[in-house]
């Protein structure tokens, strides 16, 4: 059973891209809080966060692409209404 994502067992879950976008926003908000801190530790953390944001953005694009592929091939997901998975096994 998935804990966060939409599935037949978790119809109230989220789309992967929605969670990634929310996490990206949280990291961006944290970045703004340390952007003026010139201590080496803060600068290193900010640099790491920027790299993480780049990876998250790529992950968001991949998740959106997967959703588009599934929507095109099988129609919109019905998992949030208790429908079967579009691919894979139940």
Image (spheres, rainbow, N blue to C red):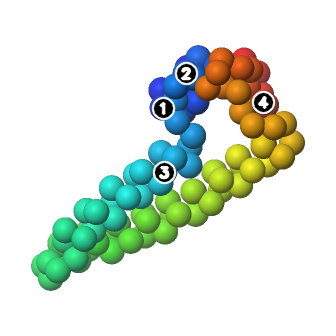
Residue 25 can be seen, yes or no: yes
- Asked whether the beta carbons under mark 3 and mark 2 sit within 8 Å of each other, the answer is no
Separation of marks 3 and 1 at Cα, in angstroms? 11 Å
Tell me whether the residue at label 1 lies in contact with that at label 2, contact meaning CB atoms closer than 8 angstroms.
yes
> Answer yes or no: do the residues labelled 1 and 4 have beta carbons within 8 Å?
no
Question: x and y percent of residue 42 in the render?
Answer: 19, 72
Q: Where is mark 2, residue-wise?
A: 10
Give the percent coordinates (x, y) of residue 29: 28, 63
Q: Which mark is residue 4?
A: 1
Where residue 45 sits, quadrant-wise, is bottom left
> Where residue 66 sits: x, y (%)?
72, 49
Distance from the alpha carbon under mark 1 to that under mark 2: 8 Å
Asked whether the beta carbons under mark 3 and mark 1 sit within 8 Å of each other, the answer is: no
**Pointer 3 or 2: first along the chain:** 2
Side of 63 where 43 appears, left or right: left
Q: Earlier in the sequence, mark 1 or mark 2?
A: 1
Q: Secondary structure at mark 1?
A: loop
Crowd band around label 2 with a 10 angstrom C-alpha radius: few (<14), some (14–19), many (20+): some
Judge whether 10 appears above or below 45 on screen: above
Mark 4 highlights which residue?
86
Image quadrant occupied by the C terminus:
top right
Describe the element under mark 4 as helix, strand or loop: loop
Seen in the image, is 3 located left or right of residue 77? left
Whether label 4 touches label 2, CB < 8 Å = no
Q: CA distance from mark 1 to mark 4?
A: 18 Å
Residue 20 — which label? Answer: 3
Residue, x 52% and y 29% (percent of image)? 13
Quarter holding the N terminus is top right
The residue depicted at 62 percent of the width and 60 percent of the height is 61
């Amino acid at each position: 059973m998935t804990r966060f994502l939409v599935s037949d067992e978790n119809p109230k879950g989220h789309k992967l891209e929605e969670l990634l976008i929310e996490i990206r926003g949280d990291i961006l908000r944290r970045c703004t809080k340390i952007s003026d801190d010139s201590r080496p530790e803060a600068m290193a953390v900010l640099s790491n966060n920027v790299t993480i944001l780049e990876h998250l953005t790529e992950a968001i694009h991949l998740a959106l692409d997967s959703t588009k592929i599934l929507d095109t091939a099988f129609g919109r997901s019905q998992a949030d209404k208790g429908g079967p998975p579009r691919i894979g096994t139940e």
